[in-house]
Every structure is written in structure tokens, then in C-alpha cells.
Image (cartoon, coloured by chain):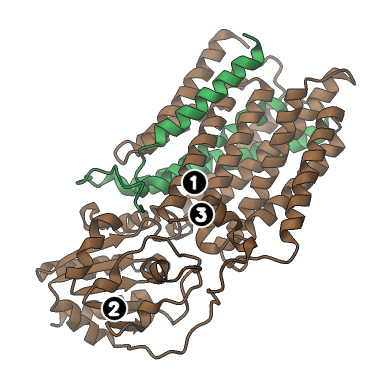
Chain colours: A green, B brown
Amino acid sequence: MTEGVVWLTIFVLSVFVGIEVISKVSSTLHTPLMSGANAIHGIILLGAILVTGTTESTFALIVGLVAIVLATVNMVGGFVVTDRMLQMFTRRKPARSPADTDGGAR
Amino acid sequence: MPTWVQVVYLLCAVGFILALKGLSGPRTARSGNLIGAAAAVVACVLPFVYVDRLEHVPLMLGAVAVGTVGGVLGARRVQMTQMPQMVALFNGVGGGAAALVALLELRHMTDAVGGGELPGFDLAATAFTIFVGSVSFAGSLVTFAKLQELMTSRPVTFPGLPALFALLLVGAIALSVVTVTDAALAWAVVLCVVGLVFGVLLVLPVGGADVPIVISLLNAFTGLTVAAGGYVLGNTVLLVGGTLVGSAGTFLTLLMARAMGRSVANIMFGALKGGSTLGGGVASDRPVRSAGPDDVGIVLAYASRVIIVPGYGLAVAQAQHTLRELVDLLLKRGIKVDYAIHPVAGRMPGHMNVLLAEAQVPYEQLIEMDDINGEFKHTDVVLVVGANDVVNPAAKTTPGAPIYGMPILNADEAHQIVFMKRSMRPGFAGIENELLFDPKTTLLFGDAKDSLAKLLKAVESL
């Protein structure tokens, strides 16, 4: 298997995993889930660190540092705000099954 | 890259899968979020450990510190009512970061080969990240401005917009091709600018009530750019994390759109077709029946079944706590009271649950639309607090209305309806609500918090 196909395989499998793991989400959790997923793509911080840490030009360094600041805001802010939202759900004891509501509409 | 590092990256990727899994169930959501955060932190610490000669470490740590302070302050200070725009902002900066990383990576690639042949697929993925990352950045900033009401929340269109749209898209494709064949940084920068303009134009025609769907869609876009970045950098955790967000985000967007009874295409491009003739957004001067808090208090106190329909206006007035006190009082009088939660009450699906949870309303009293819609016929009083579009019968009766087809709460079936409103201004979707003019309807004008406090007093004195 060539390397490109390996990457393609990881990509395609991840697509299906991504859909599968959230397929049963209740509409109550749409907002926190969106926010949590938003925080996860803050992982671009890792990419920003890898690129910035290996650059030699001053200009690229500046651009890289800006990218690191932006990515950190995304990642840290995203996880903190999601946690804040979810704190409000913790006290409760869900009396009813939370499933079956995502189709809420029709 | 040492093998152990690759294994740790794999574990981090698994962490993201578990995070999403956890976030989709109420009991596991918080731990899921923490797992995701832990995986992200571990993945970001790794380069400092294994990369030989990683340079600019103090500067980079400084940048991380600045970003952390900014992120934490933003996330802690934001009011729960303003959360949707905060998520939009976080998503935007993430997209911007991805585009910048791709620009730098392109520079790296051209430097490294020095005019030699470059792998075309890598360049294509880089061009994709630059374009879509810019779209996500600019689009998210516009959604932020709309929700923060820095600009009109109504759809903005102008003649020639579809043509301009097509032109930009063709331009972006051409520029991507040039970037791939030429690998010139200058073209990539132009591509970036085109992406920014495209992002703005993509979101402008979307009406305020639909903006959350767009945030979700842009969120998925950013995920895909991160995945493409991961491919170019040869990093599995970026690829898996980004792809997960891309696919889960797209699916979530479809779920949200379905909860609103709309298609994503209709939400994004509906205004371009010039669909709605309704929604002038002007206050009507037709006669309505209004009453004071004392009269409404009597109506509530002697009912036997009451349903509360909370909306965004309740949260804006910060009146959740007062409302809970009123409901507690009614419950003490032996009245059966529930809250009817429309899936898109508030500004985002599930937003109202968060807002009421903040006011410590017990979970059992929050009844979702499908479970409560049958009960309105047997209900004496429906108290609508700061909601409008979610009880607007136009969704059933007026084809062509922007919200037509959206499932609504059947408040119109109740014996009596009390609307608490600040003014006769239409709701977020900008459509007049027939229910306000229904003979069964009474209006209680005033600030929600103020009116609720007066209602509370009125009921207490009975």
C-alpha cells in the first residue's frame, strides 16, 4: 500500500467514525457538542508549533506566532466554554431517556 | 518521528473520538470534554519533547500564554446568552490559524525543494486549507457581528451577488490550480484574500435566526482544513482530529437544520432566490388585547395547568431566576407547570436548556416539543416569555414565510395565551406573529424581569 493510500484510509475511516459517534446525540446537547468539536479543531495549534519551531525567517516566525496565539484561543477557549456550559447539566438526574429527540422535528 | 511519539499521537486521536462520543450523552458530556482537552494538551506538548532543534521555544511558549489568557478570559467572561457568537469567534480564529499554518507550510515546501518538483497532492491540500480556512475565518467574524448585533441580523443581499459568488469560486479554483503548478507564495496570498471575501459573502445573505446553522457548518469547514493541514504535515492526530470534526460537524449541521424543518441549502442560499416577501421587520399597529400584571396574576393563580414557553428574550432580560421563583410559587399552589422547550429556543439548538439550567430549573420540568405538543389543548394558560417565532402559526399556515415548515409549539391550542413582550416588534426571524392578535391572547408589555417580578407579587398576594 502506498503512503498516500494509507492517509486516504485514515481519512475515510475517520469520516465514518465522526458520524457514528455522534449519531445518537439529543438536541439538548447540540450546542455543547458543537462547541466541543470546535475546541477539538484547535489542535491546529500542534501544526502551528511544528511549523513555527522549524522556521528561520523572521517574517515567517511572526506569522507563525500569530497562528499560535489564534490556535490557542480556539483550543483553550473552546474547551473552557464547553465545560462552562456542561457544568450546568451536572447537577441533574436525567429522568427520561435523552435519546430520540434529535429528530425533534419530524 | 520516533515510534513512541506516533503511538502517543494515536492515543490522542482516540482521545478525540472518546471526547465526541462522551459529548453526545448528557451524563458523559463533561468527562468527554475533559478527555478531549487532555488529549489536545498532550499532543501539543509532544513537539517540545521529541523534535530535535525546535527553535523559538520561549517565543512560542509566550504566544501560547497570550492565547491561553485570551481564551480563558473570553470563555469565562462571556454571558451564557452570548455563547453562540463566542463559539463563532473561537471557530473563526481556528480557521485563521489553519490558513496561516498552510501559508507557512507552502513557504517551507518551496524553500526545501528550491525550484524542484513538488508533490502535487500536498500542494492541492495546502491550497484547500488556505482557501477554506480564510472562508471560515471571515465567515465566522460576520456571524459574530450578526449575533452580537454589530450589524443587521437580517439577510443582506444585493443584485449580482450570485454572479459575484460564482466569479469568486471560479477565481479560487483557478488560483488553487496556479498555486499547485507554480507553488508561488504570492498566488497563495491572493487565494487567501479571495477566501476572505468569499467568506463574508457566504454569510451575509443568511438571516439571523439561521446563523447558528452556519456556525456549525463553518465549524465543520475548519475541521476539514485542519485535516488537510495534518496530511501535509504528515501528522496523524491533526488528520484524525480534523476529519472527526469535519464529519461530525457536517452531520450535526444536518441534524440542526432538520430540527428547524429546513434544508441546509435553503438556509444558506434561500435569500439569494429572493424567497421571502414577509418579514418586513416593522411593528404592526393592529389592535391587540393587553393587561396588567395583577390581571395576569389572577389568571395564572387560578389555573390548574400552565405551560411556560421560554425564549431568548427571557435570557436577555436575565429573568430566568425570577421565572423559576414564579413557577415554584405556582407549583406550591398545586398547579401543574412545565416548561415547553422548542429545539431551537434561544439562539442555538439546546441553548435554552443551558440557560434554564443556569437558573437551576429542575431537568424534569423541561419538556421537549414532541412530548408536550399534545398537551396544549388541555392547558389553561400558556405563558410565553420572550419567545415569538417558536409559537408563530405562520410556520404552519403561510407558505413562503421564512420559517414555513419549522415545527412549532402548539401554543395556539391552549385556552388562553399570555405573551410577555417588550414591544410589538417581531421576533428574530422578522415575521409578524398572528397569535398576538388571537382573541384568546393577552399581552403583558414590559421588560421580562420587571413584569415577572410584578407577577410574582401579584400571585403571592392572592
Looking at the image, which is closer to me, B262 or A99?
B262
Residue B334 visible from this viewpoint = yes
Question: Please, which chain is the residue tagged with disc 1 on?
Answer: B
Question: Please, which chain is the residue tagged with disc 3 on?
Answer: B
**Mark 3: secondary structure:** helix
Looking at the image, which is closer to me, B299 or B342?
B342
Instruction: Tell me the residue that label 2 is attached to.
Output: B418
Across and down, in percent, residue B6 comes to: 56, 14
Q: Residue drawn at (73%, 24%), measured in percent from left and top?
A: B122
Q: Quadrant of residue B133?
A: top right
Q: Nearer the viewer, mark 1 or mark 2?
A: 1
**Mark 2: secondary structure:** strand
Q: Nearer the viewer, mark 3 or mark 1?
A: 1
Instruction: Tell me the residue that label 3 is attached to.
Output: B212
Instruction: Tell me the residue that label 1 is attached to.
Output: B253
Judge left or right: residue B60 versus residue B144: right
Q: Residue drawn at (34%, 51%), measured in percent from left and top?
A: A104
On screen, residue B302 above or below B192: below
Question: Please, which chain is the residue tagged with disc 2 on?
Answer: B
The reply to whether dot 3 and dot 2 touch (C-beta < 8 Å) is: no
Residue type at the position of mark 2? Val
Give the mark nearest the N terminus, 1 or 2. Answer: 1
Across and down, in percent, residue B31 comes to: 36, 34
